[in-house]
Amino acid sequence: MRTRSRIICSFAVLLFCTLNGYAQESTAVVSPISSSSVSQSTSLVSSRPTSTGTLTSSASATTSQATTTVINPTSTGTLTSSASATTSQATTTVINQSQGASFPPVGSIPREYSPENLDRFWAIVGEVEAPPFTTTPVPKTPIALPTPPPQLYPSFFSPAPKDILPDLKFPKGFLFGLDTAAFQVEGAVKDEGKGPTMWDWATRQPNAVIDNTTGDITDLQYFLYKEDTARVTPLGVNAHSFSISWSRIFPFGTADSPVNQAGLDHYSDLIDYSIEQGVEPVVTLFHWDTPLPLQSFYGGFTSGEIVNDFVHYAKTVFKAYNGRVKTWYTFNEPRVYCGQIASYPFDVTLAPGVNVSTAPYQCSYNLIRAHARAVKAFREMGIQGEIAFKNDDFIGPPWRINSTEDAEASERHTAFQIGVFSDPIYKTGDWPKILTDTLPPSYLPRLNESEKRDILGSADFFAIDSYRVQLISAPRDAGGIRGCVADESHPLWPTCNEIMSFDTGGWSVGVSADPAAPWLQATPGLLRGALREMQKRWPTKKMYISEFGFVEPFEGTRQPQELFQIKEDVARTNYFMTYLGEILLAIHEDKLPIAGAFAWSMVDNIEWGSGLSTRFGIQYVDDTTLERSYKRSAFALAEFFKAHLQ
Ligand SMILES: *[C@@H]1O[C@H](CO)[C@@H](O)[C@H](O)[C@H]1NC(C)=O
Ligand SMILES: *[C@@H]1O[C@H](CO)[C@@H](O)[C@H](O)[C@H]1NC(C)=O
Ligand SMILES: *[C@@H]1O[C@H](CO)[C@@H](O)[C@H](O)[C@H]1NC(C)=O
Ligand SMILES: *[C@@H]1O[C@H](CO)[C@@H](O)[C@H](O)[C@H]1NC(C)=O
Ligand SMILES: *[C@@H]1O[C@H](CO)[C@@H](O)[C@H](O)[C@H]1NC(C)=O
């Protein structure tokens, strides 16, 4: 593990903590990348939106997709560790020595809600780094922005942000938002009564995170939230989409366990301060940080027991913040989460009877019921405002124009990646037919009539984390789709489609992000088509671009003394400007009811299995001092929104 000699250097005392003095260690290390194979479903590194394999967590998910890369070379292999491996070694916690993830057998720790038992759960995580300070500095507002950067290009080549489509405005009330998620930015993981989460554990498992970064400190937004809010208001930001850590509210997770008042108070303060600063709080209840005790008691989302516990947590939070929060999400990117939970290292924590092949679908089944029941409670309780969940992924055009096989592959992609939740929630109450035709009920449990009734209509608007759109091909082997669907051992089963990052002429579909984020390309030209398709298939009166963002190539390899280069995030700036122009066109020409766009992310943060090697922030965060610095993209967004908001 990288040693952090962190200097206590809050914003209050930054004047005395110069960068030079404390920038002694390297930031992130990017491991060598092999470009010939892919192990999307078995490696944490692709846990953000990934390509085909995410819901395919079968042992055979190692494919040879020319368009993606393995980031973590050690996890190229497939996983065979399963619930049966757990039970066969009931006395030991190590499940698979070669992968090395270690978790006590599910069900082996009693449901007892004492401080001693919480310590027992923390012991599974291991030692945790304490934050350098535990108070919240109150910034003097308004914070003065530094001088904006000079124009990037001559205007004959590229207009200034304010001059992009100057006659088009966003509709009144449009949200200019920034995103964060609890695990990725908060730090202070063991402070103020919080219980351990599965990500506190996962980051400590061998080869799970590329640079061994944990969430122990990260941006310390748990204590620096006032600074962070105050730093973005002068940019014109009027919304902050953040997630609540379930483990801060219920350290043990369960419905019959004690609530942690300090956790409730924290988010109450964050909400109040945001409102006071003119920033609308947008709340996600679950952004992947499952309370560890729930995984230990019954296997988390691979067990139906999660439904009641989630609904109880949701009701507690609804009640606490009703009237102050107006836009709610139950789940962030459930499809990605359910792929992640079937992958290393989480694959040693599944419910009895669930294996790595079935886990993504068992998770989907439990999660969608948890979502529907939480929304039902939201409505029964008369909670003010709107609620939905955050979709991820895209609807991709066929790779070969006029190929009926590729058109069918594109439908399969849509069904597995978005339709899995959006078809039941917005359209039918039931799984897409492509899924039930492909997956037996032992994989994907069927929904009964009362479940369907609860699910259908359980969202008030459509939110999409719209990072990129790529092209979709049928499996490029002799068997094509039919051969793949009929063969469970086919590497692309059950999705039976391939994501293509380049067209049939061999040209990239867009500018590629950092090599450590091989799934991500800037594809503004494909955005509107995908959004139109979403509105056509799952029509709603309101859409949000709930996340979009870019990893500047090689930014993660730069040293703090290269700050001037880090701040010059050209590719990210171009990404945001072109996407926002397309969003304006989608509103004005396609008449899409887009009511807000949320840039990921407010600050650099721990990108799950990629650690700090891939950075999404519009602000750089110095790892040692925690000092934030605006990048060019922050100013470009500010200028764009200032000119286009009304
Ligand atoms: C452990 O993991 C390795 C690498 O993924 C795999 O090859 C091996 O079969 C697994 N062993 C067991 C006992 O599951
Ligand atoms: C991460 O930790 C492992 C095990 O402690 C070590 O072997 C590896 O070199 C570390 N990787 C980095 C990038 O620091
Ligand atoms: C997982 O369980 C399913 C359903 O019981 C079974 O068909 C499949 O072979 C199992 N897969 C593995 C890898 O054990
Ligand atoms: C696709 O089909 C249309 C209508 O049949 C035809 O006009 C067009 O040239 C075809 N495009 C390609 C690239 O084959
Ligand atoms: C449907 O499934 C739920 C569990 O999600 C169960 O409680 C309910 O009794 C079932 N209803 C019917 C009509 O089978």
Image (spheres, rainbow, N blue to C red):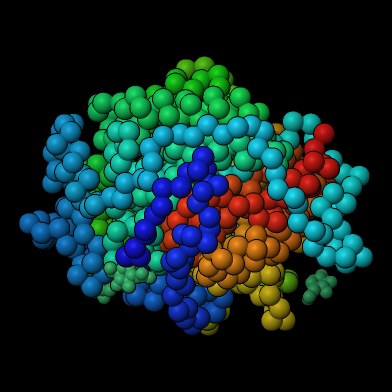
Give x and y (percent) for residue 449.
Answer: 43, 33
Report the number of numbered marks.
0
- Considering the image in quadrants, where does the N terminus appear? bottom left
Q: Point out residue 200 in the picture as x, y percentages from the top left corner.
A: 32, 50
> Ligand 4 falls in which quarter?
bottom right
Please give left or right for residue 75 compared with residue 479 in the image: left
> At 34% from the left edge and 75% from the top edge, which residue is drawn?
74
Single out the residue that lies furthest toward the front. 16
Q: Dividing the image into 4 quarters, which one contains the C terminus?
A: top right
Q: Which residue is painted at 73% across and 35% down in the image?
A: 174
Q: Does 71 sit left or right of 462 as displayed?
A: left
195, 597: nearer the viewer: 195
**Residue 182 screen position, x and y as percent:** 45, 43
Q: Decide which of 477, 176 is in the foreground and name it.
A: 176
Q: Quadrant of residue 244?
A: top left
Residue 501 visible in the picture: yes
Left of 485 or right of it: where is 145? right
- Asked whether 349 or 235 is in front, the reply is 235
**Residue at horizontal 36%, vertical 45%?**
131
> In the rendered view, would you say 276 is above or below 478?
above
Image x and y of residue 239, in percent: 63, 35
Q: Is residue 431 visible?
A: no
Indicate whether 521 appears above or below 483: above
Quadrant in the picture for residue 116: top left
In percent of the image, x 70 and y 56: which residue is there? 632
Q: Determine whether 172 is above or below 473 in the image.
A: above
